[in-house]
Image: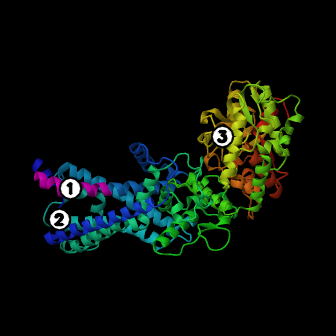
Amino acid sequence: MSSILQTTTRPTFWRIGDVGKALFYYLAALAVIVFLYGVYDRVTRYARGSEDPFERLDDLPQRTVAAAQLALSNRKQLDRDTVAGVMHAFVVWGFLTLLIGTTILGIDMDLYRPLTGESFFVGRFYLSYSFVMDAMGLLFVVGVGVALWRRYGRKLDRLHDRHTSREDDLFLGALFVLGVGGYITEGIRILGTSTVRDVSFETVSFVGWSVKEVLVMAGMTPEMAAGAYPFVWWSHSLVALWFVAWIPYAKPFHMLSSFANLVARDEKAGVRLPGVPSDASPDEIGPSDIDDFSWKQLLDHDACTKCGRCSSICPAKASGRPLDPRNVILDLKRYREERDAGGEDVPIIADGGTSVIDAHTMESCMSCMACMDACPVDIEHVTQFTEMNRRLTEAGEMDEHVQDAMMNVFQHGNTFGDPERARPDWTEDLDFEVPDARDEPVEYLWYVGDYPSYDERNQKIARALARVFEAADVDYGILYEAEQTDGNDVRRVGEEGLYEMLVEDNAAAMLDCEFDSIVTTDPHAYNTFMNEYPAFEACEWDEDDVFHYTQVVADLASSDSLGLSGSELDYTVTYHDPCHLGRYNGEFEAPRDLIRATGADLHEMPRNRDDSFCCGGGGGGLWMDLEEETKPSEERLREALEDTEAGAAVEKFVVACPMCMTMYEDGRKTGGYEDDLEIVGVTELLAEAVGARP
C-alpha cells in the first residue's frame, strides 16, 4: 500500500523537456522581476506624496492581521449586496488557494526535492491537495463567472461609467481564462497520461476528471491529448506569467493596494479631519498639486476597484448634484498618471476653467460619509473632499451663500447673523429658569447649538428638551450668550482657520464652567466636540466626556427617572438616523429606545442605521441654494410614506438632529407632503409623553 501511495502523484513538466523547463524558469524569473519593479515603482510614487497627519503604520503586525480578517471575511463586500459579497469571496478564497497551491508545488520541486532527494507531493498529501485545489478553483471560476454576468449580462449601471475601459474587460477575461485554462490543462494531462499509468486515483480531482470525460465524449484520444498537452500547458503558463508581470501596472494592482489600504486605514477617518500646520502659507492649504495629497490618499486612488458602490449610495448623486465620489477618486488617479507621463499641469480644483475637479462637484458633497461606509476597501473620500474645499476657500472660490454664513459666524458667532445676546431668547417662553452653567457647577453642560437657539421651529426642540431635563431633575446648565457655533460644518466646507478660532472660543467658555460632561442637541456638535476638539491644546476634555442628548435621556428613561412606564402615545412613526449620530458615531439604539418608551409604534424605513439616506443639510448644504432634480429630504419623506416596513401608515417622521428638522420641514413643503405627515423631534415626543407639551 505504501509503495502504491508513493506513485500517487502527477508528473511535473510532462512532455515539456529540459529546454522547456529552463525556458519556463527564465520566463518566471523575468515575470517576477517585472512584478517587483512595478511594485517598487508604485511605492516610490507614494513616497512623493505629502506626509500623512495620522499614524498609519503603528503596530503593523496587528494592523495586518486585522486587515486580513476584514478582507477574508468579505464583510464590507457583503454589506448592501449579498450576491457581490459571495462572488468576491469565491474569487478571493479561490485565487488565494490556487496561489498557495502553486507555491507549495514550487517548494516541493525547487527546495524539498533537491535538498532531500524525496518528494512530499505524493500519496495522501497529493490526493488531499488535488481535491482542495479543484474545489476552491471551482469556486474561483464560479465567482469570476458571476462577475462577468453582472457586468456584461445584467449590465449593472454602477459597473459602467466613463472610467470603464478595456482594462476592466481584460482583467476579468484573464481571470476567467486562467481558471478555466487550469482545468482544461488538468483534463488533458489526465487523459494523456492514461496510456502509461493507472489514473483512477485522479477522480479526486473531480473537475479535472469531468473535463477529461467531456474530452473523451468529444472524440479526443489519449494520444491526441498527449500531443496537445505541451501547447495547452505553454498557453496556460504564458497567460499566468503575463498576468503576474501585469499586476502592478493595471487594475489587478488593486489586489495589493486594496489590502495595503485596509492595513493603513484610520478608523476615525472623516469623523475627524486633519488639521492645517500652523506654519502653512495660504498656497499650502489644500492640494494645489497632485503631490500635495498624502501618500495614503495616493494609495486610496490606486485602491479603487471601480465597483461603484460609493456612487450608488451617494445622496448628492441621487439628487442630481454634480458629484460622483468614484469619479472624483479616479479623475485624480488618471491625472496623476497623465502627469507622470509628461501631461499638462492643471489646477486640482477650481471654479470654472480647466481643472481636475470642478468646484461645484465638491460643493455638492454633504459630508454624510455614505461613500466611505459603502467602500469595501476603506477609501477616505470625505477627508480628500474637505481638503479640496480648503483649497477653494483659500482661493476665494467658496459658494456665496456659504461665504455669507461664514461671515455671520465670524462677526456674530452664529450662522444666522443674529446678535449673540439673542442666543438664549428661546428660554423666555419656559415657566422655569434654565440654569446658567457660568454661575454654578453642573453635572451636564448643555451645548444648545445654533438652530435650537435661533430657528423658530428648532426652538421648540430646545424647550422640549429643557422640560424633559426638568422633569427628570437633571443637573444641567447652558452657556447663554457665551456659546458660539460648534464649527463642525464650518470645518467641512473648508474654513479651517475660522474653525480653529471657534474651538478656542468655545473651549475657553466651557472651561470657565465647572461640569462633569457635555451634552449636545445637535449630532454635528456631538461629533466635533467628541472627536475633534480634544486634538487641540485649548480643549481639556476627552471623548468619554461628550454625549448626545438621546444617550443621556435614554439612560434616564431606562431608570424610569422620566416616569415613562406605561406611556402610550398612539402614533405610528418612523425614525431617521442622522449621519453624524449614526453613521459617524454608531449611535442607533438610544433614539429608538426613547421612541419606544413613549409607546409610539415605530416602523423602520428600508434605509436605516448605517444605510440611512442623508437629509442634504450636511457639508454646508443647509446654507446653499443648489439645483437638484429631487431634494434628498423629499426623497426620504417619500420613502417614509411609501416604503416603510409592513406598509405602515406613518403619521410622524421623527428626527434627532436640528439640521434634519430644518431640511425635512422644507422638504415637506416643497415635496407636497404637508398633509401627509408631521416632522417631530424625539424631545417633542418625550415631552408629550411626560405631560409637558412644548
**Mark 2 vs mark 1: which is more N-terminal?**
2
Q: In this figure, which residue is indicated by the disc labeled 1?
A: 201
Q: Nearer the viewer, mark 3 or mark 2?
A: 3
Q: CA distance from mark 3 to mark 2?
A: 74 Å
* Residue 330 sits above or below residue 112 on the image: below
The answer to whether 607 appears left or right of 209 in the picture is: right
Q: CA distance from mark 2 to mark 1?
A: 11 Å
Q: Is residue 164 magenta?
A: no
Kind of residue at disc 2: Ser
The answer to whether 102 appears left or right of 572 in the picture is: left
Q: Is residue 106 magenta?
A: yes
Kind of residue at disc 1: Phe
Q: Which residues are magenta?
A: 98-118
- Closest to the observer: 290 or 366? 290
* Residue 197 sits above or below residue 532 on the image: below
Magenta region, mostly helix, strand or loop?
helix
Residue at image point 63% right, 32% down: 545
The tag on residue 529 is 3
The tag on residue 404 is none
* Residue 127 at x, y percent in the picture: 23, 52
Residue at image point 67% right, 71% down: 352
